[in-house]
Image (cartoon, grey):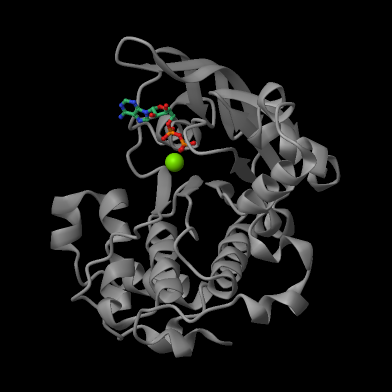
């Protein structure tokens, strides 16, 4: 039985905004899946359908063979805007992940629950922040905050982990750090993970499987070797439109999507484009 099963899922917003069209995908236990696609393709909608927040207009979504939404703690989510409580420590923020699992009342009654505390510390350790457990979230760098967000989702002990553009607002180095922690955390726990990402080059480094979405349809489903430049072009650009431009225009648009470091291929070229984040404490980001 697949960990996640979408069967003929269509989502229409309002009268006629088709955000997902007849999407059928099975995801195995422990798979690390990256969603690729241009803005407006339907990536966030797919993630929202997977976490049960948005009911599909048609079709079914099952997690471990049961309709999504029955068990409120089973899907963990990491957001681009991390939604941390800035005045609380990294530890307290991570601990709030237990809320989704236990429910508010039980969480309040068991606020001192030693198991939850240990789980929170283990999760912070997983994302490399055990030493910063008592640091105020508001004083952390963007990358560190996102790692706290991952820790919080881990504390929830979900059976499916979702992340919507978790590194979109980070510089390339912090983005890679966060992706590495996300992937390793998932691998350590054999946690099925689906994350959207718009940096194709970073996606390539971390994904096992890629779903390319365009206009609400899954038009690509394959591994790293299948994700050729042609495949990327097909995911991001409508071929009919591409025909109107010359090759220079194509190249420019391709680099828009891939990010400036695409040409270099490895860390060598990055120093030129890495820039410090504007948030305090970003110096602590290096490992
Ligand atoms: N809450 C909503 N109400 C109406 N339309 C929406 C809503 N959310 C998304 N859409 C529309 O659905 C389509 C897919 O959006 P989205 O899933 O956010 O794409 P992506 O995350 O790939 O950028 C877009 O046309 C978008 O405008
Ligand atoms: Mg989105």
Give left or right: position of 58 versus 260: left
Q: Image quadrant of residue 55?
A: top left
Write down which quadrant ligand 2 falls in.
Answer: top left
Rendered-image quadrant of the C terminus? bottom right
Give left or right: position of 80 versus 83: right
Rendered-image quadrant of the N terminus? top right
Residue 103 to residue 10: above or below: below
Residue 73, percent from left and from top: 35, 45
Residue 246, percent from left and from top: 76, 37
Residue sitting at 46 percent across and 73 percent down? 143
Residue sitting at 44 percent across and 83 percent down? 130
Residue sitting at 30 percent across and 73 percent down? 114
Q: Is residue 16 visible?
A: yes
Residue 283 to residue 122: above or below: below
The front one of 165 and 247 is 247
Residue 5 to residue 21: above or below: below
Q: Image quadrant of residue 45?
A: top left
Q: Image quadrant of residue 22?
A: top right
The front one of 86 and 95 is 86
The front one of 273 and 200 is 273
Q: Is residue 31 visible?
A: no
Give left or right: position of 83 versus 52: left
- In this view, the residue farthest toward the right is 225
Residue 269 to residue 240: above or below: below
Residue 81, percent from left and from top: 34, 58
Residue 264, percent from left and from top: 78, 68
Residue sitting at 73 percent across and 40 percent down? 232
């Amino acid at each position: 039985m697949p960990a996640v099963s979408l069967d003929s899922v269509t989502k229409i917003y309002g009268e006629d905004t088709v955000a997902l069209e007849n999407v059928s995908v099975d995801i195995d236990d422990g798979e690390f899946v990256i969603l690729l696609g241009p803005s407006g393709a339907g990536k966030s909608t797919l993630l929202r359908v997977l976490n049960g927040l948005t009911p599909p207009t048609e079709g079914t979504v099952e997690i471990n063979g049961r309709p999504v939404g029955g068990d409120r703690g089973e899907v963990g989510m990491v957001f681009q805007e991390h939604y941390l409580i800035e005045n609380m420590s990294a530890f307290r923020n991570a601990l709030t992940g237990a809320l989704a699992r236990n429910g508010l009342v039980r969480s309040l009654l068991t606020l001192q629950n030693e198991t939850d505390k240990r789980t929170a510390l283990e999760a912070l350790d997983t994302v490399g922040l055990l030493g910063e457990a008592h640091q105020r979230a508001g004083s952390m760098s963007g990358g560190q905050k996102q790692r706290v967000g991952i820790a919080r989702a881990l504390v929830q002990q979900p059976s499916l982990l979702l992340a919507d553009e978790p590194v979109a607002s980070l510089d390339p180095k912090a983005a890679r750090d966060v992706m590495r922690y996300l992937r390793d955390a998932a691998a350590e726990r054999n946690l099925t993970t689906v994350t959207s990402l718009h940096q194709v080059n970073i996606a390539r480094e971390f994904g096992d499987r890629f779903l390319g979405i365009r206009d609400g349809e899954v038009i690509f489903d394959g591994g790293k070797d299948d994700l050729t430049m042609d495949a990327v072009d097909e995911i991001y650009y409508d071929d009919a439109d591409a025909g109107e431009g010359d090759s220079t225009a194509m190249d420019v648009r391709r680099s828009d999507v891939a990010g400036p470091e695409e040409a270099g291929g490895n860390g060598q070229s990055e120093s030129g484009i890495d820039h410090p984040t504007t948030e305090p404490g970003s110096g602590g980001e290096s490992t």
